[in-house]
Amino acid sequence: MTKFEGRTALVTGGSRGIGRAIVKALAQAGAKVAFVYQSNAQAADELVAELTAQNLVVKAYQADVRNKEAADQVVQQVVEAWGKIDILVNNAGIVRDTLLAMMSPEQWHDVIDTNLTSVFNFCQAVTRPMMSARYGRIINMSSVAAEFGNKGQANYAASKGGIEGFTRCLAKELASRGVTVNAVAPGFIETDMTVAVRNAAEAEIKKAIPAKRLGQPDDIANAVLFLASEAASYITGQSLKVDGGLTLGGF
């Protein structure tokens, strides 16, 4: 396994699902890991306790990722505690699925602000420290929906498409400073967020996936580990689909 001794990482949306798997993978690979959670203090505390019991270094921060001042404060606290942030994983995300004709402004803004504005908030906060260090790895969580869309997900697909465009622009801005910026685009992953879709059509979904199975959070965590590693130092501005082949033939 790729080792991250001496590296520090910050993960948003780290208490559950894909984010939790990413926090565990980075910590178990040797990084000091801070993660942000919105409201589930119990899940955050349980994750900290689990990893601390393994003699790993992990910190949890409660914050609203939509709030720029909150993002700045978390980054400042992590830098003050550990001296730097080498790896940023923007994983925080929500869905508020409904057809556009029935979508409320609140459903639109909740998704855009949580999924996309949070990426701006945290990327801007870490940009100066990473540029000064002339090193950094930024991984933004996209989705196959960014490219292929889905009925009832105009807000979600827009947020993820925005993330991919943002990722390409920031990659160009930071490449000369030793900072890579990439995205990971999961397909159907078995998490709390996908329960409703899986309950309605899991058998049909599996038929559409060449690998004939749903992805697991660890599948995404492994992709993040690669992009955060030295093995990916010449990869930037890319979106890595981790979908079991789902998008090879579309939906």
Image (cartoon, helix red, strand yellow):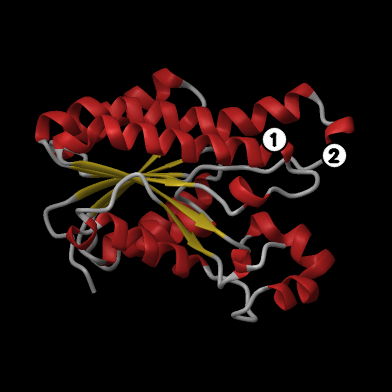
**How far across and down, in percent of the image, does residue 211 sit?**
59, 80
In the displayed structure, 185 sits above or below 2; it is above
Extreme residue in the bottom direction = 212
In the rendered image, residue 205, in percent from the top left (x then y), is placed at: 74, 70
Does residue 64 appear in this view?
Answer: no
The N terminus sits in image quarter: bottom left
Q: Which mark is residue 155?
A: 1
Q: Residue 67 location in percent, x, y?
A: 48, 22
The total of numbered circles placed on residues is 2
Q: Which residue is mark 2?
A: 99
The amino acid on which the numbered mark 1 sits, given as a three-letter code, is Asn
Earlier along the polypeptide chain: callout 1 or callout 2? 2
Dot 2 falls on a residue whose secondary structure is loop
Q: Residue at x 31, y 37 (%)?
A: 171
Amino acid at circle 2: Leu
Position of the C terminus, as image quadrant, is: bottom right
The answer to which image quadrant residue 10 occupies is: top left
Give the crowd class for mark 1: few <14, some 14-19, many >=20 residues within 10 Å: many
Q: Is residue 204 left or right of residue 6?
A: right
State the residue at coordinates (27%, 66%): 28
Q: Residue at x 81, y 68 (%)?
A: 201
